[in-house]
Image (spheres, rainbow, N blue to C red):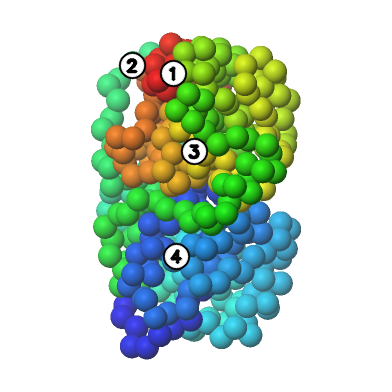
Amino acid sequence: MAASAPQRILVRGVNWLGDAVMTTPALLRLREARPDSHITLLTPAKLRDLWRNHPAIDAVETFAAGESAWSVGRRLRDQKFDLGLALPNSPRSAFELWLAHLPERIGYAQPWRNLFLTQRILQRPGAVAMHKRSPAEITRLIAQNPARESVPAAAHHIFQYLHLTAALGAKPEPLMPQLALPESALAEFSAKFRVAAPTADSPIFGLNAGAEYGPAKRWPLERFNQAAIQIQRRTNCRWLVFGLKSESDGAGRIAADVPHAVSLAGATSLGELCAALKLCRVLLTNDSGPMHVAAALGTRVVVPFGSTSPELTGPGLPDDPRHRLLRANAPCSPCFLRECPIDFRCMTGISVEAVVKAVL
């Protein structure tokens, strides 16, 4: 689809932090294809800070948690957008574009929302669904112990969003996920939280032992603790321990046990989290939003993967050599479940020694 004149484009963004970072290559390609168009991103209010100063976006509109689609649509009508692009697959995202009276509405074809779209994009070749395994399937896989199936690099979710923006004339070739950080952000973070700048003799490492989706994504907390202690002894690093407010107890225990560690769990805004992650030489983390943010800011990450698939949602671009993604040889992984129905072998099979080596 080619635009004959500059247009006002509304992009309905995704709802989760990690997913939002994975949309940045598609948004940058859209900006490249439509340099004269005005691009507004509609995003949950909790993600507003992620998009400040981003080169792909001209304006940001937010909606609050619990705000109805009717309310969002009414607010957007007066802005007279020419077309809308729904990045999520949800019925609501397409419904909001319809309620905003956009003449063109583009998104993936899905039941319960096709009525609200004027252009329905079929799933791209090579797309791989995140299939949740049943307990029976897990039991069968453990008994058979099959070889791990090969997953093509083009299965990564970055390509899902690139395929959508290609419908607007953007190039489908991937770019590195990118986030913009104001020059003042690092100094402001350091001053507020009294964190001295990293040096060669005292580098800053980050640790994120949480994962919002559920416990199946979390390497055991005591292993994070043990790894952090060993790494600190060998590097004289200072640890910044991240997490949600609900994870502050676990983060506090790590900060109490590990020398030169401070917990920031629940204490930072999203913008401050970005600044802190940028300061880190490496981030040891579960598969999570901060993992994607760190990689997009140029920080290397070390990630134990268990219930999820690095081929689908790994940091950066597929096979990025800057990062270390660790997996145990569990035939039932990835199961994509929130909680493990058996013995958590996909995570307990990743040793402290392996993680320490990867970080070092």
Badges 1 and 3: C-beta atoms under 8 Å apart?
no
Which mark is nearer the camera, 1 or 2? 1
Residue name at image x 49 percent, y 38 percent: 291
Q: Secondary structure at mark 3?
A: helix
Q: Which numbered disc, 1 or 4, marks the residue that appears first in the sequence?
A: 4
Q: Residues within 10 Å of mark 1 (few under 14, many from 20)?
A: many
Residue 291: mark in rendering = 3
Q: Residue at x 48, y 24 (%)?
A: 201
Which mark is first along the chain, 4 or 2?
Answer: 4
Element carrying mark 4: loop
Residue 297, above or below 63: above
Which comes sooner in the sequence, label 1 or label 2? 2
Cα separation between marks 2 and 4: 47 Å
The amino acid type of the residue labelled 2 equals Asn
In the image, which is nearer the foreground, mark 3 or mark 2?
3
Q: Which residue is mark 4?
A: 55
* Position of the C terminus by quadrant: top left
Q: Earlier in the sequence, mark 1 or mark 3?
A: 3
